[in-house]
Image: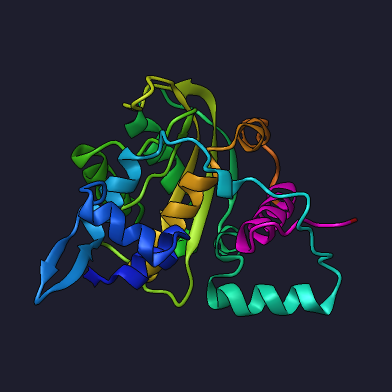
Amino acid sequence: MDLTIKDVSELLNEPETTIKKWFQDGKIPGYKLDNQIRFSRSEIENWMMRSKTQKEKPSDVLDSKNIINLKSEKAKKIVAKKIGTQAFSLFRALYKGTVINNIHGTTKEDVIKSAVKIFAKNLSLDANVLTDLLLDREKLMPTSLNHGVAVPHTRDFLIPKSYDVVNVVYLNKPIEYGALDGEKVKTLFFLFASDDKRHLHLLAKIAHLTRNKETLEFIHQHPGKAHLLNFIKDWETKLSVPGLEKVK
């Protein structure tokens, strides 16, 4: 599908002017059609996977001088107006999914097959078919992010649901996954979206989530589903509005 500058801006949580400048500077793949800048899902997806080594930008860091009390009605209205239906999208996808501990395997093929056998039924999908789709995507390019995290997903297949699903899998032992930083993978976020935009949005969120050192330390402690959901909900709240921090 074709994406506009506005689409990519919303997906990556960057101003439209920044996306346009990245395109003009050749930093992000795209093309011009009838003098309009357009982007393809597959190219943006691959670009995000290759760009996962970038460090946190200054805008990612919360400014303690600009804190809003989340308990106030004003904060709730700001969040609702700013991000609309994308609010807590990762939280909702994780809620629909499952958290699986101690998956055994020495290769990515073994791990993917073992994990899919567990959660395929919840997706109402055939485990063998889904495994083949996931491995086909891995052959195209490894879905590993840096720092021991991977996001297995399919190339074009979208789940026949009205919602998205993310299944988190913790490995018994780290495995080689073809990561750019050479680090072995120990945590996997299996991503299944119901449309292309939501797929890219969630992929960008997971990549953003796993760039933070403290977040990585938390994830690699293999938290249970309830603990992980609480963490993600707090993180997405802060991400939604720059400078927004929960006041206990």
Task: Identify the main secondary structure in magenta.
Answer: helix
Left or right of 231? Residue 99 is: left
Is residue 142 or residue 8 the one in the foreground? 8
Q: On the rendered image, what quadrant is the C terminus found in?
A: bottom right
Q: Among all residues in the image, which is located at the extreme left?
A: 34
- Name the side, left or right, on which 165 lies relative to 36: right
Identity of the residue furthest to the right in this view: 248
Picture quarter containing residue 234? bottom right
Q: Position of residue 213 (x, y in %)?
A: 61, 31
95 horizontally vs 155: left or right? right
Location of residue 224 in the rendering, given as x and y in whole percent from the top left corner: 70, 44
Q: Position of residue 53 (x, y in %)?
A: 41, 33
Q: Is residue 120 visible?
A: no
Q: Is residue 172 above or below residue 6?
A: above
Q: Work out whether 31 lies above or below 226.
A: below
Q: Is residue 240 left or right of residue 107?
A: right
In reply to whether residue 237 is colored magenta, the answer given is yes
Magenta stretch in the rendered image? 226-247
